[in-house]
Image (spheres, helix red, strand yellow):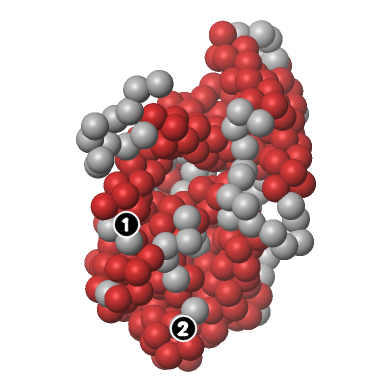
């Protein structure tokens, strides 16, 4: 065995560990996204807000839509707000409850703590939405776009599911479940992921105790992958092509892999050259400021650094909470395009909540 003469070189096993973590997180995130995309494509989630006539019912419905991992729930609420159906309070509730695409990574890295975080966000979302309704009224805002323009905008993002709802009710989409290259590729990929997880090559192994052990969590992930495999095998050709392949795999796979790998490398470098935990504890004000400023970006990806720092025990929960409150994934983009005033007002409301969370973190040390 040769020894490395460079004391700062990253050992091979560390690089291998980074690649294993990146592969596991990416595969599990894609598996979860396949399931969520299938549910979103076949369910009539848009009707949820329309069925809720009371102010609190609309807030709860909006928050539940915002809780859907990814951006589809946020897109739906933004569409309803810009079309004059949902109130500003409902918009705030959805955006506070949202965890964006980072939700998939959180559930892959620390599932129990991710559930706790989501519960806190839900409570904050309902309180913030109620406060927004008191300040700006419970009536829906005037429409910023004609209904046709809003529908076309979200059809472009594949978040309005008219053709898939036909498929769910027995339309033309049910006609074809034939074996195709993409169906086989997805099925083989899921089978390989399941085999790697079952054999221990990949898996959730952060050494956390608690209600569920690592073995139980990995079994849960295997069950999720098996469910995704059933979806891939049974999905009709139109749903598989337009949603599972184009929207999930083609649009997100490379981006998630690169962001995950880059963030893991950054965290590894910080851990090697800096005592990350001690530095973070000594510069909490800077971390809170960075978490909130980066949270202003209406996109998923940059926030992943905070998720992985927390997953490795180098970041307090309150910093992750502040960043998650501020960010809203890609759902903020159509709102910014339709109404800068509403976007700024929404971000200001979220900044106030994030600042309170940061202050509580500083005072109580969590």
| Pick the front one: 192 or 129 | 192
- Dot 1 or dot 2: first in sequence order is 1
What x and y, as percent, mark residue 234? Answer: 73, 23
Res 197 → quadrant: top right
Are there few (<14), some (14-19), or many (20+) residues within 10 Å of tag 2?
Answer: few
Which element type, helix, strand or loop, lies under badge 1?
Answer: loop
What x and y, as percent, mark residue 215? Answer: 74, 44
Which element type, helix, strand or loop, lies under badge 2?
Answer: loop
What x and y, as percent, mark residue 242? Answer: 52, 26
Q: Which residue is mark 1?
A: 298
Q: Is residue 336 above or below residue 11?
A: below
Q: Which residue is mark 2?
A: 365
| Pick the front one: 211 or 187 | 211
Q: Residue at x 58, y 50 (%)?
A: 206
In this picture, residue 178 sits left or right of residue 206: right
| Pick the front one: 122 or 73 | 122
Res 111 → quadrant: bottom right
Res 27 → quadrant: top right
Q: How far apart are the two marked residues, 1 and 2, measured between alpha carbons? A: 29 Å
What x and y, as percent, mark residue 122? Answer: 59, 72
Q: Residue at x 43, y 90 (%)?
A: 363
Q: Residue at x 48, y 71 (%)?
A: 317
Q: Is residue 177 above or below residue 275?
A: above
Q: Residue at x 22, y 35 (%)?
A: 6
In this picture, residue 229 sits left or right of residue 276: right
Q: Is residue 60 visible?
A: yes
Total numbered labels placed on residues in the image: 2
Are there few (<14), some (14-19), or many (20+) residues within 10 Å of tag 1?
Answer: many
* Mark drawn on residue 48: none
Q: Is residue 62 above or below residue 54?
A: above
Question: Given contact means CB atoms under 8 Å apart, are the residues at marks 1 and 2 in contact?
Answer: no
Point out the image quarter for the N terminus: top left
């Amino acid at each position: 065995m040769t020894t490395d003469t460079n004391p700062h070189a990253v050992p091979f096993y560390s690089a291998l560990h980074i690649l294993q973590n990146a592969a596991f997180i990416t595969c599990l995130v894609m598996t979860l996204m396949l399931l969520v995309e299938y549910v979103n494509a076949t369910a009539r989630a848009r009707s949820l807000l329309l069925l809720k006539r009371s102010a609190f019912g609309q807030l709860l419905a909006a928050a539940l839509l915002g809780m859907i991992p990814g951006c589809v729930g946020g897109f739906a609420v933004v569409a309803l707000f810009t079309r004059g159906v949902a109130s500003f309070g409902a918009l705030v509730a959805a955006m506070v409850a949202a965890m964006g695409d980072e939700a998939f990574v959180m559930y892959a890295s620390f599932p129990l703590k991710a559930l706790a975080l989501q519960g806190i966000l839900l409570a904050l979302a309902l309180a913030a939405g109620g406060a927004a309704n008191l300040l700006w009224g419970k009536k829906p805002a005037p429409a910023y776009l004609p209904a046709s323009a809003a529908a076309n905008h979200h059809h472009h993002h594949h978040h309005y599911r008219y053709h898939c709802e036909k498929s769910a009710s027995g339309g033309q989409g049910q006609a074809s479940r034939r074996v195709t290259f993409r169906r086989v590729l997805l099925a083989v990929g899921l089978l390989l992921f399941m085999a790697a997880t079952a054999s221990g090559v990949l898996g959730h192994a952060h050494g956390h105790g608690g209600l569920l052990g690592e073995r139980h969590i990995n079994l849960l992930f295997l069950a999720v992958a098996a469910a995704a495999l059933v979806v891939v095998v049974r999905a009709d050709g139109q749903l598989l092509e337009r949603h599972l392949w184009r929207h999930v795999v083609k649009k997100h796979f490379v981006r998630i892999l690169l962001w995950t790998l880059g963030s893991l490398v950054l965290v590894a470098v910080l851990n090697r050259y800096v005592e990350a935990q001690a530095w973070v504890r000594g510069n909490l004000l800077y971390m809170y400021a960075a978490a909130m400023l980066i949270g202003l970006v209406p996109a998923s990806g940059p926030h992943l650094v905070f998720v992985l720092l927390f997953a490795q025990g180098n970041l307090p929960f309150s910093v992750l909470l502040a960043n998650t409150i501020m960010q809203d994934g890609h759902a903020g983009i159509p709102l910014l395009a339709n109404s800068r005033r509403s976007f700024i007002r929404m971000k200001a409301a979220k900044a106030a909540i994030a600042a309170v969370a940061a202050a509580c973190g500083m005072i109580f040390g969590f």
